[in-house]
Amino acid sequence: MDVATARMRLESMLAELDRSISVLRGDPAGRDRSLADAGADLTDADRTRAMLDAASRQRTAVLAALRRLDDGGYGRCVDCGTLVPEGRLEARPEAARCVQCQSRAERRR
Ligand SMILES: [Zn+2]
């Protein structure tokens, strides 16, 4: 994926996340229920908080990816420096790590 495409996709993800976050925070301007399907067994408040958490985390990841585009590090794993496979970036343009380092990072949590 070339840098211009990556930037375009990341910027549209960022706009979408900003919209979702303002909806989840109760901004009446853009309220819709399209995000409400995730986690059906949670109460509304818990569900909203969980979605807000996930959206905020993803927003942070997208911003970090945009920074890596600016400084030329985009597409390389932030942990081991190998190239992140093209298919992974297609699926998740904000991915910061290769699959191996990502699963290691998730086990650390
Ligand atoms: Zn790695």
Image (cartoon, rainbow, N blue to C red):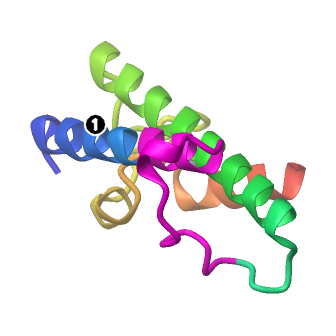
* Picture mark count: 1
Name the residue at 49% across, 56% down: 31
Residue 30 in percent (x, y) is at 42, 49
In percent of the image, x 73 and y 48: which residue is there? Answer: 53
Q: Is residue 86 left or right of residue 25?
A: left
Res. 17 visible in picture: no
Q: Please state which of residues 27 and 87 is positioned toward the viewer in this rendering.
A: 27
x, y percentage for residue 43? 87, 73
> Looking at the image, which is closer to me, 76 or 31?
31
**Is 64 rendered above or below residue 95?**
above
Q: Is residue 28 visible?
A: yes
Instruction: Residue 14: say if magenta.
Output: no
Which residue is the extreme one toward the top? 71
Q: Residue at x 88, y 50 (%)?
A: 109
Q: Which residue is mark 1?
A: 11
Q: Nearer the viewer, residue 26 or 101?
A: 26
Residue range of the region highlighted in magenta in the rendering: 17-38
Q: Residue at x 48, y 72 (%)?
A: 34
Residue 83: x, y in percent?
Answer: 37, 45
